Image: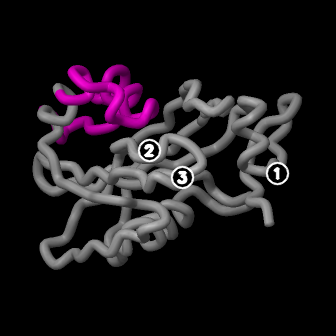
Amino acid sequence: MSTLIPAWVDGQLTPVDKLEAHRLGLRHKAISIFVVDGEKTLLQRRADGKYHSGGLWSNSCCTHPDWGEPPEQCALRRLREELGITGIYPAHTDRIEYRADVGNGLIEHELVDIYIAYARPDMTLDPAPEEVSEVKWIGLYDLVADVQRHPEKYSKWLAIYLSSHLDRIFGTLIR
């Protein structure tokens, strides 16, 4: 069974098979969430079996909304499905577009709704092993420095977010 995501075909937003959208490099909708606790952000290492970027460290959670799914609902769904997180409510911070070759003949050309979610003191993590192989908390500036030193360890989109859009995403958190 295929997953249909919102992608632009000939300028029209259309339901397109997720893998096909990536094979063709179609511009499509996505969401990315950064869960933060003070100056630290939660990273996940993508499961090795993911269809692209497996084994790479990335932001807390990201995905594509299903066709017809509002981005806010998608953000809550993926926090629950990927990380087992409930009871926190992501705040929309920006919308960013990027295009990157993610290997295996696949292209991410995303219009991404970016969210920040504040961790609760009693928040528990229960990562789904088919999605996430490992999680860790890291200081934002330590993360930026490590991505610059070792970009091969990180997803392309995380490197783009941190190198080109840090202020837009994290705003007052970094001031």
Q: Earlier in the sequence, mark 3 or mark 2?
A: 3
Identity of the residue drawn at 49% across and 66% down: 130
Please, is residue 93 above or below residue 160 in the view?
below
What is the span of residues highlighted in magenta in the rendered image?
A: 146-175
- At label 3, the amino acid type is Lys
Examine the image and state in which quarter residue 140 appears. Answer: top left
> How far apart in space, not on screen, are marks 3 and 1 (Cα)?
22 Å
Mark 2 element type: strand
Residue 8: in magenta span? no
Q: Main secondary structure of the magenta part?
A: helix
Q: Earlier in the sequence, mark 3 or mark 1?
A: 1
Which residue is nearer to you in this view: 88 or 20?
A: 20
Marking on residue 50 = 3
Residue 70 appears in the picture as rendered: yes
Q: Which residue carries the number 2 mark?
A: 114
Q: Earlier in the sequence, mark 2 or mark 1?
A: 1
- In front of the other: label 3 or label 1? 3
Which residue is nearer to you in this view: 154 or 97?
A: 154
Which residue is nearer to you in this view: 104 or 10?
A: 104
- At label 2, the amino acid type is Ile
Residue 116 appears in the picture as rendered: no
